[in-house]
Image (cartoon, rainbow, N blue to C red):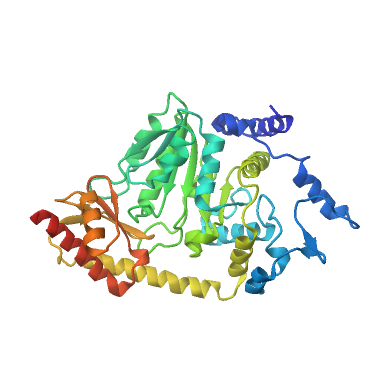
Amino acid sequence: MNPLAGQLNESIKAGSPHVYDMLSNLGREIYFPKEGILSQSAEASSHAKKYNATIGIATEGGIPMHLGVIQDKLSAFQPKDLYSYAPPAGKPELRSVWRNKMIQENPSLEGKSFSNPVVTNALTHGLSIVADLFVNEGDAVVYPDKNWENYELTFGIRRHGVTVNYPLFTEDMKFNAAGLREALLSQKDKGKAIVLLNFPNNPTGYTPGAEEGEAIIAAILEAAEAGVNVVAVTDDAYFGLFFEDSLKESLFGRLADLHPRVLAVKIDGATKEEFVWGFRVGFITYAGENKDVLSALEQKTLGIIRATISSGSHPSQTFVLDALKSPEFETQKHEKFNIMKGRANKVKSLLDSGKYGDVWEYYPFNSGYFMCLKLNDVSAEELRTHLIHEYGVGTIALGEHDLRIAFSCIEEEHLEDLFDLVYKGIQDLKQA
């Protein structure tokens, strides 16, 4: 093992032996080189005032070399903020601004100890970092039966974690905290579990209420007290899009200092929050009382980034930072929020109108981009195929009877026509 990795491991072990036990084999072996090209280039940037012949970019006239056909389109920004490599951890100012944003939007974080966010290549990259650092073959990865399919690829196929599902909803359509508790306690003999909390939920668009949130925290705490080391990951991809009475904060704040056996990890991003999906800018943040542990986890995270993508997109980080600092940002974001809320409310009014009879039920939704129909009489895949070929309507079939509909990408005035066509497609199949 590299001595730098050994030093990081010793820091983690001394500050939190439980967190050390959570690390995968790769998590223990990874480190960020302090004497490599990046560190030497950083030193040169500070002291090599005559000639800096270190890092692999080209310069001209004292600034990064660039093409006019590109810069002419991006003339609002300086070449230094576009063309050179961003630091592996991300632009320092962006990290600071995002941290302040997290505190402002999550008052429960005030006074809590957590790391500076590290910039990732959006949400999926952040989740894959968690998988690399904490999942060994056979480790339990706990998440509900209604989930984003990429979890299986990221934690199962890539890292050979074992998926442990529980029903998302109870019979009265509340979050199934008892199922989460049972899934976590089932790992008591192994002593370790990675739990994924995704609210607003993809695919259902559901965010628990305050009482349900307390039950989630209680379930994780009970598992920790029973001797299970829990890596508690909040996948906050759709954070902020809360349209009704639900939690308005990430559970990361409540998890931050819950128990020595709980490591809270927040994965979030500008992608969906700020409507910049293609920019691929996300963040990973760790909570913990011990600063040395947080520092070591950050260094290991940088090691993963260096070994995979080296660093994130500099232009995208610049664009996001510029937007976050704009005095018009909050007003414009609220305008888009109201559009999304209007679409969600329209869908709910249509579904509650009685217009479509008893061909479907729908799972609770109060947030995010999506909602899910539970089809009573037809196969979701048959309906999906029929709709796309007969009516030019695209939907997502999930399992035997669930059909996901993204109201986020349908104008409010077209939603009734959309659901009319889905209903017509069901009638077609029933009469066939």
Q: Position of 390 compared to 310: left or right?
A: left
Q: Is residue 290 above or below residue 88?
A: above
Instruction: Name the spot of residue 193 as percent of width and height, x first.
Output: 46, 33
Which quarter of the figure has residue 291? top right
Quadrant of the snapshot with the N terminus: top right
Looking at the picture, does residue 152 appear above or below residue 186? Answer: below
Asked whether 69 or 27 is in front, the reply is 69
Position of residue 217 measured from the top left corner of the image (x, y, whole percent): 43, 44
Counting every numbered tag in the picture gives 0
Above or below for 226 versus 364: above
Q: Which residue is rendered at x = 50% and y = 64% of the image? A: 274
Q: Residue 188: horizontal and vertical position, in percent?
A: 42, 27
Query: What is the quadrant of residue 6 in the picture?
Result: top right
Outermost residue to the left: 431
Q: Quadrant of residue 301?
A: top right
Horizontal arrangement in the rendering, residue 339 relative to residue 63 (left or right): left
Q: Is residue 198 visible?
A: yes
* Viewer-closest of 204 and 266: 204
Image quarter where the C terminus lies is bottom left
Taking the image as shown, residue 359 lies to the left or right of residue 381, namely left
Q: From this viewpoint, which residue is outermost toward the right?
A: 50
Res 352 visible = no
Q: Nearer the viewer, residue 182 or 387?
A: 387
At a point 19% along the width and 52% down the height, the residue shown is: 375
Which residue corresponds to the image point at 68% horizontal and 39% vertical from the top-left?
A: 292
Please, which residue is most extreme toward the top here? 189
- In this picture, residue 102 sits left or right of residue 151: right
